[in-house]
Amino acid sequence: MDLMFVLLEEYNNSGDLFILCSDFNIPIFTVVIIHILIKHMKNYYLYFLALILLPLTGKTQVRISKIFTDNMVIQRDVQVPVWGWAEKGERIAVTFNDKTFKATPDKSGKWMIKLPSMSQGGPYSMEIVGKQNSIEIRNIMVGDVWVCSGQSNMEWSVEQSSNAEKEIASASDELIRHFKVPRSHANVPGDELAGGQWQVTGSKTVGAFTAVGYYFARELRKNIDVPVGLLNTSWGGSRVEPWMSAEALGIEDPESVMADLLRKKELESEERLQKLRDQFGEIPETDLGMKGEVPIWADPGLDESKWVKMSLPALWENAGYEGLDGIGWFRKTIDLTEGESNQPVELGLGKIDDSDVVWINGIKVGGMEQKWNVERVYEVDASILKPGKNVIAVRVEDTGGGGGIYGEPELMYLKTGNDTRTLTGDWKFRVGAFMASQSIYHNQIPTLLYNKMIYPVLDFPIKGVIWYQGESNAGNDEDALEYRKLFPAMIKDWRSRWNSGDFPFLFVQLANFLEPDEEPADHSWALLRESQSAALATPNTAQAVIIDIGEADDIHPGNKQDVGQRLSLAARKLAYGEDIVYSGPVYKSHEVKGNKVIISFDQVGSGLSAGSKYGYVRGFAIAGEDGKFVWAQAGIEGDRVVVWNDSIETPTAVRYAWGVNPDDANLYNKEGLPASPFRTDGN
């Protein structure tokens, strides 16, 4: 009783008593009564009365796992567990497709039944009945469920990707369904998801779908007539370790290890905050630029004498504010003639990481949330402008990583009817708030995402996995090489725990990114790609190579259509047994003849091809006895490539597409799939 008393008091004091409705499945009217009693009671007798109501009204409510909702897809051709929670001794009946199955909870309160194996079909309904309540789930399809996991390039939505408006308007395949697991974490494995809802494809829903997953499913549906469910469990910026179980990582005492790691992260956060305090004085945790809903730092008459100068475009980390996650304000004054102020203008502010609100002369003219790679272009009505001085104020909110106004200088401008003037150069800047809580990145800590975003759905049968992750493990050579062990270990562990056999595991190799190397060079991204390719030694895996569709200035390339299409080829081969070419050329062997190196390949398809009208093969580098690499000439001879450089008499090694951005690499097979990067001097 003492424990329940404390619980009720805590809920009431926090103002969150009604959370009891969901936490304990108590009907809302009961919570209202308890709330009133606690609010007015003067002694423990009324507390006791409130406690009596709890077991009589709420404990026998049957619950079902949050993965089971309207519009879901369940896996065909296998037994499908359906599970939830109820009071011990409760009798639960699950009816599906005119068959009823009975279950009783175990000691922990969990119950489970298994639907028999079914072929594709639907729509069906399911009813779960307990003593006190029943649950109905509608519009269920039986088809293939694909897990879509990884970091931001998997999480990246259709509305954030190329041709979004057209793609959203044309989306109409209702047999593609999507479930987004909310970003969530836990120190130990937990049985229940944080939330989520299955959604049917349509112009009102598809914009929020994983773009890679959606285009993958769309391509599959062109060739495989089966409903496709996308179980999207991804988190931007995540390393691979958070997606792995403690056992897979060899952690014997996960609770203790996680507690130590979190304490370490908290200390690092405080150290970063103290460094900012030492440099800039006290850093507030609430935005000084806002007074309630009023943007006081957008006031054109504001005294800027205490503000500092910052040259834009630039991330503020590169301008002396390293470690700042939070809110920064920028201001700039521009002069307009009377003619310029009498007509609308176009305001370009480049890209802003992550969110922004923009005012001119204290009047809001635009803003975006969590669109860190989107160019800001805002139309400004003439009624906002005036002859003479006009003040632009930009509030930037950064939730982690880089922050500020960045991008190409030409993207920062003010376009009037007669002129386009640059907005680059000095702006006034001031920190509005520091977000200490954002400094602990749970998507970087081992096991935390597995515990809450994978473990709760391990009983949900799947067809396979598509995976796009690795950027966060490519920051240095040590991490990139360690990935060679971690990634196959994760694949093996997921397969053993999902109890769906050695399902196809299809992954995306890192795209080209940043500026190309002028001369052959080593890079941790090249090592990470090599580590990804090494995972192909694990049975029933395939890799989609995309070194030809990345963007130098954007870690999130907009072309997700080709990524999904290349993954779908691998699925059609591995999961559905089609006799198709699903991979570009893969290094097989080499031999040295004189001053030339002759490379042989697997996966040549109907032949090798150079993506050049002149037939030149680019992207190769060659080294002599001194081990120094130089760019090489190369040509296709049948199913082999001959590589040489006239200055090297005795070649010792060859590399292809080796670097952070091998943008000129152009070796393909005739099916149009790019060759995977490789080196002959690797371990």
Image: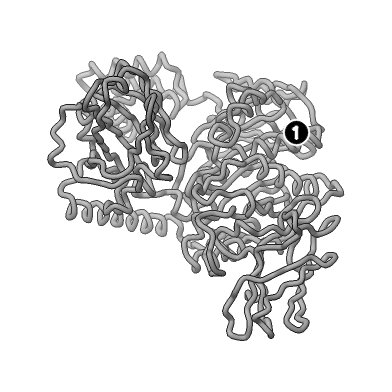
Figure check: 31 above or below 85: above
Q: Dot 1, how many residues are within 10 Å of its Cα: few (below 14), some (14-19), or many (20+)?
A: many
Q: Return the x and y of residue 149 as percentages of the image width and height.
A: 59, 45
Taking the image as shown, residue 495 lies to the left or right of residue 361, namely right
Give the quarter of the image for residue 259: bottom left
Quadrant into which the C terminus falls: bottom right
Figure check: 659 above or below 166: below
Report the front residue among 438 and 417. Answer: 417
- Looking at the image, which residue is at 73% across and 24% down? 96
Quadrant into which the N terminus falls: top left
Q: Return the x and y of residue 218 as percentages of the image width and height.
A: 71, 34
Report the front residue among 386 and 456. Answer: 386
Report the front residue among 148 and 634. Answer: 634
Figure check: 41 above or below 398: above
Taking the image as shown, residue 594 lies to the left or right of residue 489, namely right
- Three-letter amino acid code at the position of disc 1: Gly
- Looking at the image, which residue is at 66% across and 82% down? 648
- Looking at the image, which residue is at 33% across and 58% down? 264
Q: Is residue 376 visible?
A: yes
- Residue hosting label 1: 143
Q: Is residue 128 visible?
A: no
Give the quarter of the image for residue 521: bottom right
Give the quarter of the image for residue 516: bottom right
Report the front residue among 452 and 433. Answer: 433
Taking the image as shown, residue 635 lies to the left or right of residue 272, namely right
Q: Return the x and y of residue 163 as percentages of the image width and height.
A: 60, 32
